[in-house]
Image: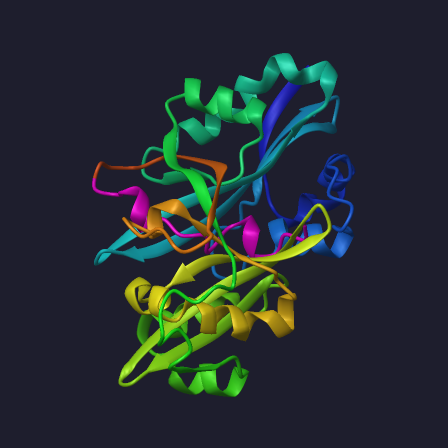
Amino acid sequence: MTEVRAVGAEAFAEIYPLLRQFPTKQMGEPDWRRMLFSTPWSDNPQRGYALYADGRAVGFIATIFSNRNIAGHVERVCSLSSWIMEPDHRSEVLKLLMPILKLRDHSILNPTPSPAAHGIFSQLGFVPFETERLILSPIPDGARALSGSFTTSKEDLEKNLTGEEATIYAHHAWCAAARHLLLRRGDRECYVVATAMHKKGIPFAEIQYVSDWDLFWKLRLLAHAALFPGTRAIALFVDRRFAGERRPLLSVVRRCPRLYRPAHKGLEPRMIDGLYSEMMNLKW
């Protein structure tokens, strides 16, 4: 007999044996707990859904809830992570996913689906909010590529960020993978959140949030310089939807499927960023 339960932080010890099956060797027990079971920005005690067989967890999918300020509206968002099923119970996958599909008042994100998950979620009505990413080499696009300044100081960020950016920083300052910086040129400022990651042992920095994309593209070489001490990134990853018609010099395009089911048609792909998700604490 199997049953699906909504689980909270108290269930971590029951879920952790499943999480250990993921090939992400850099993630230890404290890392999994931090990423999926400790989200201080949310007052929702739920951390996911688990499938139990005879009292033992045999399947799990994490739900990272947040309330986002998007285009002047508060949007309820659920970002999915760490979907895993033991082989003997994969025929019951829809039983585990059914509670998620019932969250009609939330926009549901699946930012890093495996090929198998991509196929299943596509059949369940999820659509792409991204298909590609740009890999940006540290090549200047113009003569003023470094004509600005930046700070990564915790004290400077706490002092200068205001409004929604201050809230975002407060929510993510504790996150293990997140790197924060503030770019400046003249009277303009741009708050950037990136995450450190490795692909085949090579360090990169993935841009997860930018408050002023126009200024970021003008100063993206400066952003790379600011991120390098903390990431050793040889290049930046930026989702293609944020580039518009830009084609940065020597950039490389790679496949990057991301899925969502928006709560309404007004939530467009460009409005979706990487905050409040597994990426903030994932160790690659």
Q: Main secondary structure of the magenta part?
A: loop
The residue located at (29%, 49%) in the rendering is 244
Whether residue 46 sits left or right of residue 258 in the image: it is right
Whether residue 63 sits left or right of residue 201 in the image: it is left
Q: How is the image coloured?
A: rainbow
The residue located at (48%, 74%) in the rendering is 181
The residue located at (63%, 55%) in the rendering is 197
Which span is picked out in magenta? 266-284
Taking depth in this image into account, of 25 and 257 the one nearest to the observer is: 257
Taking depth in this image into account, of 39 and 87 the one nearest to the observer is: 87
Whether residue 19 sits left or right of residue 197 in the image: it is right
Res. 174 image quadrant: bottom right
The residue located at (31%, 52%) in the rendering is 246
Residue 270 part of the magenta-drawn span: yes
Image: 257 above or below 205: above
Residue 173 can be seen, yes or no:
no
Location of the N terminus by quadrant is top right
Residue 166 can be seen, yes or no:
yes
- Extreme-top residue of the structure: 91
Residue 229 part of the magenta-drawn span: no
Residue 206 image offset from top left, x and y in percent: 52, 56
Residue 107 image offset from top left, x and y in percent: 35, 40
Residue 259 image offset from top left, x and y in percent: 42, 34
Numbered label tally: 0
Taking depth in this image into account, of 178 and 249 the one nearest to the observer is: 249
Residue 217 image offset from top left, x and y in percent: 35, 64
Whether residue 70 sits left or right of residue 3 in the image: it is left
Image: 66 above or below 138: above
Taking depth in this image into account, of 28 and 141 the one nearest to the observer is: 141
